Image (tube, rainbow, N blue to C red):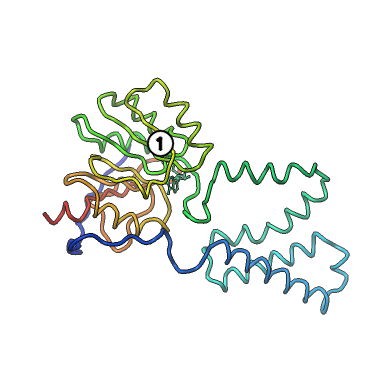
């Protein structure tokens, strides 16, 4: 079904003492502000272009919005935003024009905003959106669990489906999931009712210690990984493992890589915290 590749362990020496954690993706730039800047620059440039070169565009809102999208994409690229934002910039204004033409009730806009907030919470700050591990990843994680009873933590457990799969297979272990987005947390919490060995907490996993867990599972984003590497080194128990779905720690070789045979060719990166490796 799947193959596990062993790779060399980390070549970086163990940190001496505790290291201060900095916020995820701390590049010094606010992602909301740079997205807003790209959109505003798009509006200014499209407005100028339309006014000076193609005045007939001002009577075609959709074409004007498409031009704004193209300018916003260029601005986003020049501002060094991640590539996944480019298509969003391209379609943002054209979509707004199209939806505006549908004459929808006014309350739908704030309702949509609230719904998005409840599902995705502060993705702008965490830079970790909601997407879920599939069952084959769950099967692979099960094989990484120690044979003896242990504690397992899912950092940002989403709807909790992965944990419920693990709970069913390993009733001898205790599972904890932490989620900060209200709607996924609510779903995970409700679905965990009656399962004595599954605990779903509402909160920020950066404030939760990784000590005492035999396996910590993370399916986050590249932005969160540098901070998570430091947290794992500082807090994880000797002999424990951190399994990161898709996103490796920067500048560190995993102890093992598990290639999951699924449509997305998912890779699980398995790390032992540095203090474990160098003891
Ligand atoms: C990619 S999803 C993974 C969901 C689940 N672990 C899985 O594998 O199916 C990441 C989740 O982490 C949550 N999250 C991101 N940052 C968080 C934080 N600081 N504290 C708690 N949850 C967080 C997001 O809301 C999202 O639900």
Nearest the camera: 185 or 9? 185
Quadrant of the image containing the C terminus: bottom left
Q: Is residue 197 above or below residue 182?
A: above
Nearest the camera: 41 or 71? 41
Residue name at image x 16 percent, y 54 percent: 277
Q: Is residue 225 above or below residue 104?
A: below
Residue ID for mark 1:
201
Nearest the camera: 41 or 54? 41
Q: Is residue 243 above or below residue 44?
A: above
Q: In the structure shown, which secondary structural element does the residue marked by tag 1 occupy?
A: strand
Confirm if mark 1 falls within 8 A of ligand 1. Answer: no
Q: Residue 58's quadrant in the figure? A: bottom right
Q: Residue 147's quadrant in the figure? A: top left
Residue name at image x 33 percent, y 43 percent: 217
Q: Position of residue 18 (x, y in %)?
A: 23, 59
Q: Position of residue 260 (x, y in %)?
A: 36, 42
Residue farthest to the bottom, as pictured: 52
């Amino acid at each position: 079904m799947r193959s596990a590749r062993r790779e060399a362990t980390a070549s970086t020496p163990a940190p001496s003492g505790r290291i201060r954690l900095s916020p995820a993706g701390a590049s010094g730039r606010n992602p909301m502000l740079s997205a807003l800047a790209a959109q505003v620059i798009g509006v200014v440039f499209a407005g100028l272009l339309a006014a000076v070169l193609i005045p007939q565009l001002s009577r075609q809102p959709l074409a004007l919005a498409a031009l704004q999208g193209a300018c916003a994409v260029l601005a986003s690229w020049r501002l060094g935003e991640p590539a996944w934002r480019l298509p969003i910039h391209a379609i943002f204004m054209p979509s707004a024009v199209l939806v505006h033409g549908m004459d929808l009730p006014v309350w739908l806009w704030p309702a949509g905003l609230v719904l998005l907030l409840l599902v995705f919470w502060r993705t702008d700050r965490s830079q970790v959106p909601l997407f879920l591990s599939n069952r084959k990843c769950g099967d692979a994680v099960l094989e990484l669990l120690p044979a003896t009873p242990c504690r397992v933590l899912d950092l940002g457990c989403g709807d909790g489906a992965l944990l419920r799969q693990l709970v069913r297979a390993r009733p001898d272990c205790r599972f904890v999931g932490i989620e900060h987005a209200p709607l996924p947390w609510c779903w995970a919490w409700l679905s965990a009712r009656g399962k004595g060995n599954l605990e779903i907490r509402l909160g920020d996993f950066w404030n939760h210690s990784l000590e005492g867990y035999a396996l910590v599972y993370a399916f986050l984003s590249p932005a969160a990984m540098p901070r998570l590497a430091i947290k794992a080194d500082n807090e994880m128990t000797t002999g424990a493992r951190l399994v990161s779905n898709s996103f490796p720690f920067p500048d560190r070789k995993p102890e093992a890589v598990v290639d999951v045979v699924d449509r997305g060719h998912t890779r699980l990166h398995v790390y032992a915290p540095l203090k474990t490796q160098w003891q």
